[in-house]
Image: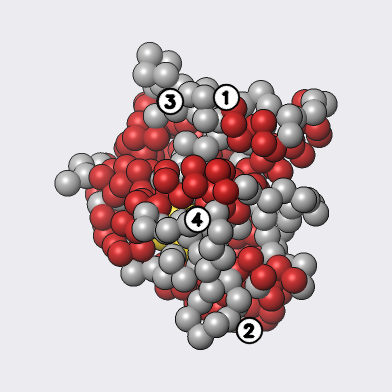
Amino acid sequence: MPPTSSIDDRRRRSGVLRPIIHVGFGHSGTTSLQVNVFTKRPEFFYAGIPYGELGGIFSCIKYQDIHEYDPVTVRGLCEQLIFEKMRRDQRLLISDETFVDQPAIYYTPAMIPAQMVAMRLREQFGACEVLFTLRNQYRYVVSNYLVLKRNYASLAHRVIEPFDDWFAGNQTQVRNLFLRNLDVSQAINVYQHAFGRDAVHVLPLELITEDGTASYLSALGAILGVRFSEEEIRSYVALNVSPPHDIVLNDEQRIFIQQRSGRGNALIAREFNLPLREYGYPMPDDAEPGLVSPTRSGGSPSFFASSMRSSGQYSDA
């Protein structure tokens, strides 16, 4: 059972709702959520990307080794920059996909283990509701590469290697930087241990592409405890969309992804009652992952040909 903290005690006395931490994964519509929802709702005190003056707090939590990290100093910064500025009727909302995913930049920082990040968040912010956003790994991998390609060029003035070389290179280590979360169940399990199983929620990006913005925001609202107006639904815009590309995963690449993500997808689909198979996610019993393009029941096209994508509203970020 996760320990209580002085923050938990203070929240119980004041009646403030638990904070919400959106921890990733990357490339699952995170930028769209941060811009369209998290920063716009007045009932939230938003502490997330882009951080501004709060960046030091979360850099310490994510990157400092044990001998460098000072929880008392970080707690003081949280009090000064977050808790003292929040209105009594506001709920803290933190959003940062790099709590679990590697920052998609050339000069990428060395991250501490996800379990340590989760425990530091628990220590600083007490009992929280945790949101994971997911994306089909076949598309997640390509989006990861495209974001890296863009950031290499714009931030480091470098040219990344072709996709096939990059993908092969990310298979050469026991634990690589950019594809280590193909099995999403591992990071989800870490946060369940830190915050409790009932505190963790999972929202697939494909809900918006398959069932529409209203369904997606309805599911999100149930997690956040808010209702979205018709205007908010109409004005929801996909952001950070990947440029046109000609990357097509070959059979070998799809098999690699399926072997590393399928079992975890099946576990998450069962535990959270999610139709990940219908959304085309790799599954452990896929006979020919390189050849099958799944469709939902009733013969409707899979998310690869969704109306959101064809209309240019599909986010690859």
Q: CA distance from mark 4 to mark 1?
A: 34 Å
Query: How many other residues sit within 10 Å of disc 4, few (<14), some (14-19) or many (≥20)?
Result: many
* Residue found 77% across the figure and 67% down from its top: 312
For label 3, the SS is: loop
Residue 53 falls in which quadrant of the image?
top right
Amino acid found under the numbered disc labelled 3:
Val
* Residue found 82% across the figure and 26% down from its top: 157
Q: CA distance from mark 2 to mark 1?
A: 41 Å
The percent coordinates of residue 303 (x first, y second) are: 60, 69
Q: Nearer the viewer, mark 3 or mark 4?
A: 4
Residue tagged 4: 289
* Residue found 39% across the figure and 29% down from its top: 113
Residue tagged 3: 174
- Give above or below for 225 relative to 153: below
Mark with earlier residue (3, 1): 1
114 relative to 24 in the view: left or right: left
The percent coordinates of residue 185 (x first, y second) are: 36, 49
Residue tagged 1: 109
Mark with earlier residue (3, 4): 3
The percent coordinates of residue 80 (x first, y second) are: 49, 37
